[in-house]
Structures are given as C-alpha cells and as structure tokens.
C-alpha cells in the first residue's frame, strides 16, 4: 500500500471510465509518468488480471503480470492492478489492454490507445531580410562570409540592367524574407506564415515556401524549417510585416507565434524611370467667365483634372507659385488691385506626372452706379467744375480788387466835372 501512496503522490494518472468495449484515446507529455487504470480489477491481491501492450518497444503483444519482471523500469503493474509507465517516451506509443477477473467471476476488459507529445520552444525567424525589392527576385546569398543581396545595385546602371534580366530568366527565384525555425517538438506539427496578421498562402507566383523537416536520431524530436520567399508587387505596401506560427499536432493547443519582423520594400530599379502616363487636359474654369470683376467683387477659379485618385492642385499667379495649401478651388473675395493678374493651376499625380492649365486674366472694371441717368452724370461734371473754380478763386482775389480800384478812380473825375458845370 505504501508503494501505491508514493505513486499517487508523484504520478500523473490518466484514466478513462466507461464501458469495457472500445478503445480510449489518451495523450501524455513525453518524460512524464502515466498510470492506466484496469477496470474491474480487485483493489488488492489476490488479483486475476493481465496487461498486454503493443508499442514501439515490442515486436508483438507483450504480456505483463502483477508478479513483475525485467520490464519494471519501463512499465509495471501496481498493487491495485493499474499499469505505471514512470517516464513515457515516444517508443511507448501504442495499444494497452487489460483483462481482469472479479472475485465473483465477472471478466472486465480495458483498452487504451496512447499517443505522446512534446511542445517545442517558441519558434523564431532566423536570418531575416532587411529589405525586399519590388518586382525583382533577389535571394539572400553568402559572400565572403557576410550576407548580401544579389540584386543590390546601389546606383550602378550595369547591375540594375543585369537584375532586370535575371528577373525575366529566373522567375523561380523570390526575395527571401527569412527562415522560421521550430525545434524539439513531437509530433512534427506545422509552420505557417502571416503577412500583416493575415495567413499567407503560397501560390508559386509571388509567394513561395520551402519546408524542411528533420528528426533527431536519439530523441526522436522534430526540427522544422520554413523559408519564405516573396516578390512584392510594385506600388504595394512600403513596410510589410511578416510573422510565423507553429501549430502542434497533439494535443489541440494554441499556436505559438514568432516576434514579427517589418521590412522595407525598394523599387526594382531607379533607372530608366518609367514614362508617366499624361493627365487628361487640365481645365481652369473662372466665374465670371470674362475674368473681369468690379472692385470689391468675387472671383471663383476651379481647376478640373479628371483622374482618380484626385491629383494635388497648386496655383500660380504671374508665373509665381502661391503659398497656399493644395486645393481645386481658388476663391478671390473683395477683389482689389492687388488681385489683378494672370492665374493658372498645376495638377500633380504620383503616377501621371504634372500638367499646367491654360492661364486666365483677372482684371477690375469701373462701373456706373445703378439708377443714375445721363443728366445726373452731367450735373456731377458741372459740380466738379464749380468746385474747381471755387478752389482757384482765392488765387485771383488780388487781381479783382485792383481792377475794382481802377474803376472807382475813373468814376471820381467824371463826378467832379459834372459838379463844376452846375449853377
């Protein structure tokens, strides 16, 4: 009984209760103890029971009895009829059966199908790339003991042309993202890749995965390697994020994830630059249409560039760019002399280049006030003349006084003569 208490203190007991018919599936972690219960067996001797097992350690069915034997270090029958495996291993996978006879002569059978597992350490991405080249295959190669890129031209025309030729002749090659490694697992399990958090499915075109599975000759544990190669599309995300996950075969557990890596995508070749697709003709619409507006009026300029996505619109006046944020509409309110001039707009699109519209002129016209008549206008002119003469009167005042004095002097002698001829 002491032996049974000791085993109960440290053994991991995995038993299934139920009908005798049918085999029960069990999973146990490698290196841990496992206890299998023999249903119907008397709790203490004398016992009539028999254990049979067919595992990786046996060529055929092996029979174990309560009396013990040379298999005690691998598996032995406990006093209560249960079977103990002190440290289960990969070789212990297989079928275990027990047949017990109760004291009243009833026979009970138990059957177990045992599988073992080992969860590996957290997977990791080794030899990660630092950049990818869009549209051009460029695997990582070893050169003088250091990692380099076979299509890294660094401004060299010859290397750029050569890389473009390689991309056409060797379409089976892809830029290497990195290699995901999982070590020490059983069963083998699987590795999978993710791009920006979403599963990345190999298609043999832009995404390719090279997998390798190795098994340790002594421990029987698996090492998995998965090399991911991707050719990014031109115009795609500039900084994609990749990660890898390990899914164990047994038991059903959550996947183990690597730390993500973020790469930079470079253009395939800086030269020759592709010819930009020209924009459709850019139209500049002005209201009022003539571009002539009264002093203090409003002018609206609208730049129309029919392309998607909409381009950025900048404005030019008299050949000089205006320091304004990009906008398709330019509103001139309370127009004054400073607003007169020639205006045009420039539409810029990242894939279509830039195009300038035809220029329009904005000018100020003098207008007659509404409700006035020709007579009223003539009165205004006469009033202006009168004011002008009134302004000049003080300048001629001295001359008029002299003329008036001369007239008075001539009148005084005439008056004296008339008085002398009187009675």
Image: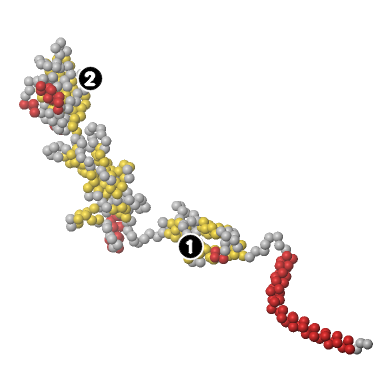
Q: Where in the figure is residue 238, as x and y percent of width and height?
A: 34, 52
- Provide the secondary structure element on which disc 1 rests: loop
Q: Residue 245 carries which label?
A: none
Q: Which residue lies furthest to the left in this view?
A: 70
Which is nearer the eye, 417 or 2? 417
Q: Where in the figure is residue 256, as x and y percent of width and height?
A: 25, 39
Q: Earlier in the sequence, mark 1 or mark 2?
A: 2
Quadrant assignment, res 191: top left
Q: Mark 1 points at which residue?
A: 322
Q: Is label 1 in contact with label 2 (beta carbons under 8 Å)? A: no
In the image, residue 244 sits, relative to residue 379, either above or below, namely above
State left or right for residue 93 relative to residue 344: left
- Note whether residue 285 is visible: no
Q: Name the residue under label 2.
A: 18
The residue drawn where x is 14% and y is 40% is 216
The residue drawn where x is 15% and y is 10% is 104
- Note whether residue 260 is visible: yes
Q: Residue furthest top?
A: 104
Q: Quadrant of the N terminus?
A: top left
Which is nearer the eye, 181 or 206? 181
Mark pair 1, 2: CA separation: 87 Å
The residue drawn where x is 53% and y is 59% is 284
The residue drawn where x is 92% and y is 87% is 422
Between disc 1 and disc 2, the foreground one is 1
- Provide the secondary structure element on which disc 2 rests: loop
Q: Where in the figure is residue 105, as x and y percent of width and height?
A: 15, 11
Q: Quadrant of the C terminus?
A: bottom right
């Amino acid at each position: 009984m002491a032996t049974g208490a000791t085993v109960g203190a440290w053994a991991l007991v995995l038993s299934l209760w139920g009908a005798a018919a049918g085999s029960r599936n069990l999973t146990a972690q490698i290196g841990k103890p496992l206890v299998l219960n023999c249903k119907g067996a008397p709790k203490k001797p004398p016992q009539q029971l028999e254990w049979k097992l067919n595992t990786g350690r046996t060529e055929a069915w092996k029979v174990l009895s309560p009396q013990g034997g040379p298999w005690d270090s691998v598996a032995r029958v406990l006093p209560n009829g249960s079977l103990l495996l002190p440290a289960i291993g990969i070789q212990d996978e297989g079928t275990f059966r027990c047949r017990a006879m109760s004291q009243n002569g009833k026979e009970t059978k138990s059957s177990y199908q045992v599988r073992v597992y080992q969860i590996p350490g957290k997977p990791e991405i080794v030899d990660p790339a630092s950049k990818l080249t869009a549209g051009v295959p460029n695997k990582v190669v070893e050169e003088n003991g250091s990692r380099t890129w076979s299509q890294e031209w660094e401004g060299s025309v010859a290397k750029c042309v050569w890389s473009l030729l390689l991309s056409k002749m060797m379409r089976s090659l892809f830029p290497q993202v990195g290699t995901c490694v999982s070590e020490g697992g059983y069963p083998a399990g699987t590795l999978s890749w993710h791009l920006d958090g979403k599963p990345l499915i190999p298609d043999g075109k832009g995404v390719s995965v090279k997998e390798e599975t190795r098994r340790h000759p002594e421990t029987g544990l698996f090492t998995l390697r998965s090399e991911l190669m991707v050719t990014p599309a031109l115009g795609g995300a500039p900084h994609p994020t990749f990660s890898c996950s390990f899914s164990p075969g047994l038991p059903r557990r959550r996947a183990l994830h690597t730390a993500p890596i973020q790469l930079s995508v470079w253009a395939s070749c800086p030269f020759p630059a592709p010819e930009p697709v020209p924009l459709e003709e850019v139209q500049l619409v002005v209201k009022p249409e003539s571009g002539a507006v009264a002093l203090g009026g409003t002018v609206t300029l609208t730049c129309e560039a029919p392309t998607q996505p909409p381009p950025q619109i900048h404005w030019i006046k008299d050949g000089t760019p205006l320091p304004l944020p990009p906008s398709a509409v330019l509103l001139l309110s309370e127009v004054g002399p400073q607003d007169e001039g020639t205006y045009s707009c420039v539409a810029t699109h990242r894939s279509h280049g830039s195009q300038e519209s035809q220029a329009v002129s904005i000018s100020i016209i003098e207008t007659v006030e509404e409700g006035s008549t020709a007579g009223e206008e003539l009165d205004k002119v006469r009033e202006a003349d009168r004011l002008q003469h009134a302004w000049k009167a003080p300048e001629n005042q001295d001359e008029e006084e002299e003329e008036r004095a001369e007239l008075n002097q001539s009148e005084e002698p005439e008056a004296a003569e008339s008085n002398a001829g009187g009675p």
